[in-house]
DNA sequence: CAACATCATTGATCTAACGCAACGGACATC
DNA sequence: GATGTCCGTTGCGTTAGATCAATGATGTTG
């Protein structure tokens, strides 16, 4: 396997302060890895051997209960990190939602490199703080929102996230997730997700095109639905 | 107001690597502040002017929807930080659950000090990563657990958290929260929390002593309840 | 200690979401 | 283009938890 150059490109935002020499050193630590859709590369509770940087694709972080109920606790996109720096065990499973490419670092080496590069750690800290805010916002949704609010919020958020950085939310796009996965994110059943989506379609707020396609017909009404039942 | 010495004691774990001179400098940045039970010192969406370190007491982090529904997204204890370093606005409200003492830093000064002390930032990063893991564990509870599981898990966790570091969970203790606050943490109504508690009492798993007191009579059964309906 | 306020408990009803089952369309394989 | 599989959709009965309302404790104030 070759040193992880595309990761360094991806991670550029992370280490733009590093010197060329250091960046090269960082790149040599990592190894490219392809992860096909559906493959799980970390299990909850397992020792976390690696830290990885997402180069392309999307992956879900999830935890589950014995009987199969699953909750997706996060979704990571290119340039995000997965794994648990400085930690013993990884508290959730990581599974590819689409074919993904990663840049994988042995955890020990990554930890040491980070420790000796304060700027890298600073950027990691900022990202982690952002991620924590996002997780807590999500908790409001899980704990207190109706099914309608959950689904509306989800559609709105995806529209925003799929748009180019700083752009207006998309009005027509493909959902990156299956109905079941949406249900696992929102803490609902697949049937409830379906019913809410078709109800929103009947109300003229959105249109559903095929399995994955969504068009937002009335953004204001969608916004309303995201806030009140 | 005097420089924040007790904060430096509290924060010792955070900056044990700092020199005496630096520690003194850090202490001078902060100011002691008493926060009585129920007082809110940050509102969601408001500009985050300060970062603070909890010296004593407990505070809740919460977000809410227009109509009054509230979700507690975190509880902070002594030595934890509140506020949003490096951020513009604070995404949730912070309210004292009990009389609390804080050490408050102007955000700008704190950010600068942190930036120039990598060890401090490293420790902040580790804490934030821990907090993120905790938040995500909580999400599983909110999204996929039954009322019974939620309440049982809550009791078990409090018993663990109130025990001295590294000690066995307590079997008899006072809940630090009212029924309503427990409901806001678990995404339930106050009535449901009550009913689950009395059901657990009738089942001989716990005993309820007065408003706040709890005795765990059968830890194994409690553990079972925390996992399956 | 009486009066009040607050918090906790319990009962009775209602409803949003669940669970099950049937059906239908999309896509892959031969 | 027939066959099978997977995924999404819809209908219908059930249920966990919400909601409404009344009653009981506990603690506080004058």
Image: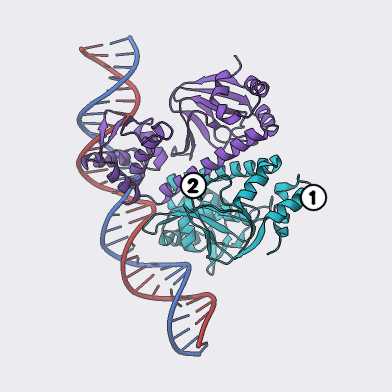
Chain colours: A cyan, B purple, C red, D blue
Please rate how many residues cluster around mark 2, counting C-alpha atoms within 10 Å: few if below 14, some from 14 to 19, many from 20: many
Res B5 quadrant in image: top right
Residue B189 shown left or right of residue B206 in the figure: right
Pick the residue in front: B114 or A179: B114
Callout 1: SS? helix
Please rate how many residues cluster around mark 1, counting C-alpha atoms within 10 Å: few if below 14, some from 14 to 19, many from 20: few
Callout 2: SS? helix
Per the rendering, the mark at residue B48 is none
Task: Determine if marks 1 and 2 fall on one subunit.
Answer: no
Per the rendering, the mark at residue A20 is 1
Q: Quadrant of the N terminus of chain A?
A: bottom right
User: Mark 2 — on which chain does it sit?
Assistant: B
Pick the residue in front: B11 or A228: B11
Residue B69 shown left or right of residue B19 in the figure: left
Q: Residue at x 68, y 52 (%)?
A: A165
Per the rendering, the mark at residue B136 is 2
């Amino acid at each position: 396997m070759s040193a992880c150059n595309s990761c360094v490109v991806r991670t550029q935002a992370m280490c733009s302060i590093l010197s060329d020499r250091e960046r090269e050193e960082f790149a040599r630590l990592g190894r490219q890895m392809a992860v096909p859709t559906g493959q799980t590369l970390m299990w909850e509770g397992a020792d976390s051997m690696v830290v990885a940087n997402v180069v392309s694709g999307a992956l879900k972080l999830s935890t589950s209960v014995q009987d199969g109920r699953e909750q997706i606790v996060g979704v990571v996109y290119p340039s995000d990190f997965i794994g648990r720096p400085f930690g013993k065990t990884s508290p959730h499973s990581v599974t590819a939602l689409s074919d993904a490419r990663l840049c994988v670092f042995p955890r020990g080496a990554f930890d040491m490199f980070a420790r000796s590069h304060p700027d890298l750690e600073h950027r990691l800290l900022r990202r982690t703080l952002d991620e924590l805010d996002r997780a807590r916002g999500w908790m409001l949704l899980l704990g207190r929102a109706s099914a309608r609010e959950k689904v509306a919020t989800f559609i709105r958020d995806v529209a925003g996230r799929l748009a180019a950085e700083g752009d207006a939310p998309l009005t027509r796009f493909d959902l990156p997730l299956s109905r079941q996965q949406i249900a696992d994110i929102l803490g609902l059943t697949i049937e409830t997700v379906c019913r809410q989506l078709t109800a929103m379609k009947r109300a003229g707020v959105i249109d559903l095109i095929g399995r994955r396609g969504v068009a937002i017909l009335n953004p204001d009404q969608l916004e309303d639905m995201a806030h009140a039942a």
